[in-house]
Amino acid sequence: MKEYAKIGKGTVLVTDGPLKYIEFESLNRYRDLLIHFMSTRHGGVSSGECSTLNLGLGRNDDRSNVIENFRIICNATSVNMESLVLTNQVHGTKVCRVYESDMGKGLLRESDLKGTDGFITTAPGVTMVTFHADCAPVFLFEPSAKAAALLHSGWKGTLADIVTKAMDEMKKIPGFDAGRVEAVIGPSIGFCCFEVDEDVYRQFRGKYDNGSFYSHISGTKWKIDLKAIIRARLAEAGVDIRNIHDCGICTKCCKDLFFSYRGDRGRTGSMAAFMQIRQ
Ligand SMILES: [Zn+2]
């Protein structure tokens, strides 16, 4: 028996026994066309710093635990585990278009999709998967063209502007209209908690010169509003600001529910975001 509770802005926390995962109301409006969700840290079999629903293969965890955790969340959401295609993220801007022939890559078989931080698909039944533990997941869906993208936009990806790269790729899809895109920025480190040194601040300021993105703490310490930058990049790429939904959840502030790289001082597991054009 699943229970549903509202958290953040437009976010639904689904509790299914020990398992907890989230969905977004703006994308649930398209549930006939789209499957999407994101895991939390609850409901898996991993222990220690990866307790309990670690989905990252590169973490301090046994592969068998990660596979079992994928099985648990896929069963609960009625997603075929063989349909998953996983990124192997490098904090870059490479976004791969994926097809039915890519299903299983990165989990059930070797992947030739190297160095990719995002996927785009129009192929029904292909489940895109990205990994997060403070870095923002960005879900993009264009319901008329039936095109979806899922991105990992951490601070490096945000600085390098993976959002614009992905939107440029999506615009090549026949019938695609940026103005119809629904965009969701999922749980990730907030303006409240993303502190950086002067050098990182200067890189951002040199590229995105809008004072509202930054807050000076003291000395060489600054805060950067990564989600505001992502929202601005989406708007610049033609997404209607009314269709840009920031769930407003900071992973570090909510580290009891979400893995947080900074909140757990680097010793943590990984959540995953999932998105599939329904078959
Ligand atoms: Zn915070």
Image (spheres, helix red, strand yellow):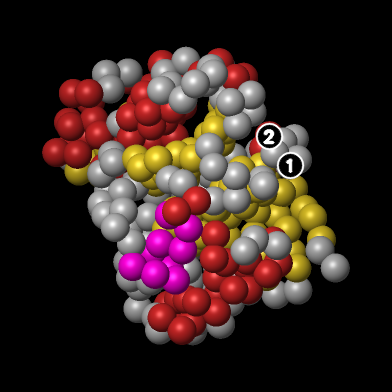
- Screen quadrant of the N terminus: bottom right
**Is residue 112 in the magenta section?**
no
- Residue at image position (55%, 75%) is 69
Give left or right: position of 168 versus 248.
left
Location of mark 2 (residue): 26
Give the x, y percent position of residue 133.
Answer: 42, 58
Of pointers 2 and 1, the one earlier in the residue sequence: 2
- Structural crowding at the residue carrying mark 1, measured as other residues with C-alpha within 10 Å and reported as few (<14), some (14–19) or many (≥20): few
Residue extending furthest toward the right: 1
Say which quarter of the image contains residue 120: top left
Could you give the CA–CA distance between mark 2 and mark 1, rounded to whole angstroms?
A: 10 Å
Please provide percent x and percent y for residue 72.
63, 73
Q: Residue at x 70, y 67 (%)?
A: 76
The residue type indicated by label 1 comes to Arg
Q: Quadrant of residue 24?
A: top right
The residue at 48%/58% (across/down) is 103
Residue 273 percent across, percent down from the top left: 52, 53
- Identify which amino acid the numbered label 2 is placed on: Ser
Question: In the rendered image of this protein, does residue 243 appear above or below residue 56?
Answer: above
User: Visible in this render: residue 251?
Assistant: no
The residue where tag 1 is placed is: 31
Q: Which one is nearer the viewer's eye here, 207 or 71?
A: 71
Report the magenta residues as a range: 102-110
Magenta stretch: residue 109 in it? Answer: yes
